[in-house]
Image (spheres, helix red, strand yellow):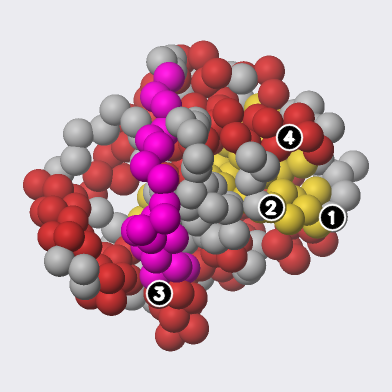
Amino acid sequence: MTLSHDVAGDGPTLVLIHSTVCDRRMWDPQLPVLTAAGYRVIRVDLRGFGDTPMPDRPYNNADDVAELLDELGIEQAALIGSSGGGRVALEFAARLPQRTTALALLCTAVADHEPSARLSAFGDQEDALLEAGDVAAATELNVTAWIGPHADDATRELVRRMQRHAFEVQLAPVAEEHGSIKKDVDLAAITAPCLLVSGEHDFADFHDIAVRLSEQLAGSRHLHLDWAGHLPSMERPEELNPVLLDFLRETVPAH
């Protein structure tokens, strides 16, 4: 199954992989900026998000991204990932380093992280609400947890719609239960330059992950934003976009 996606612009390829609170619409503030800077931008919806349906067989998100690039005839790309999308980008870069030109990871998750008590409590509360059938309350829990204080009402409403849609797709009675296949990943195999961004108003887990990865990955650097929550690309795109452009111009300059 091909991931739902859109392609815009010309130049070096960037693949934008959304947070699991969102779908590819989260990148609306970045799309015109990146294409104007001379990049070809591919935004994807992972399985069970946005316009991509639930899987009908076991799957792996990084494989899905690789297969999409194959279908589009793209050999190499820079990956920009948010949260759970960052985890997918890390796996892709570790397993396919020759195809990865750069990594920009915003408040990224990582496969082997042991959640803090606060993050575990959030997960338990979300599970309880969903098991009780209260999708609206679970959605509001996510909006409150993941969006920083500087986001405007329109951003909060878009996150609300994206999260609610994901829950409805993933919890539908007709949805098949097929889990993602976990593959052995050695992050030390990553060779691409990497920008790691964390936010002061996010769960501390994601700052700790960024610090750990910055020490683990050669050619990486960590930027901690004092204004940001978990979704800085949506909360203050006018602040985040120049950061992304500076990194991309340094690592994968547009021709």
Amino acid at the residue labelled 3: Arg
1 and 3 marks in contact (CB < 8 Å): no
Tell me the residue that label 1 is attached to: 9
Q: Nearer the viewer, residue 53 or 195?
A: 53
Element type at marker 4? helix
Q: Nearer the viewer, residue 192 or 120?
A: 120
Tell me the residue that label 4 is attached to: 69
Tell me the residue that label 3 is attached to: 160
Which numbered disc flags the more N-terminal residue, 1 or 3?
A: 1
Element type at marker 3? helix
Q: Residue 5's mark?
A: 2
Amino acid at the residue labelled 4: Leu
Give the spatial CA distance, label 3 vs label 2: 21 Å
Element type at marker 2? strand
Which numbered disc flags the more N-terminal residue, 4 or 2?
A: 2
Q: Residues within 10 Å of mark 3 (few under 14, many from 20)?
A: many
Q: Specify the segment rendered in magenta.
A: 162-183
Say if 51 sits above or below 59 in the image. Answer: below
Quadrant the C terminus occupies: top right
4 and 1 marks in contact (CB < 8 Å): no
Residue 219, image x, y percentages: 54, 25
Residue 184, image x, y percentages: 41, 15
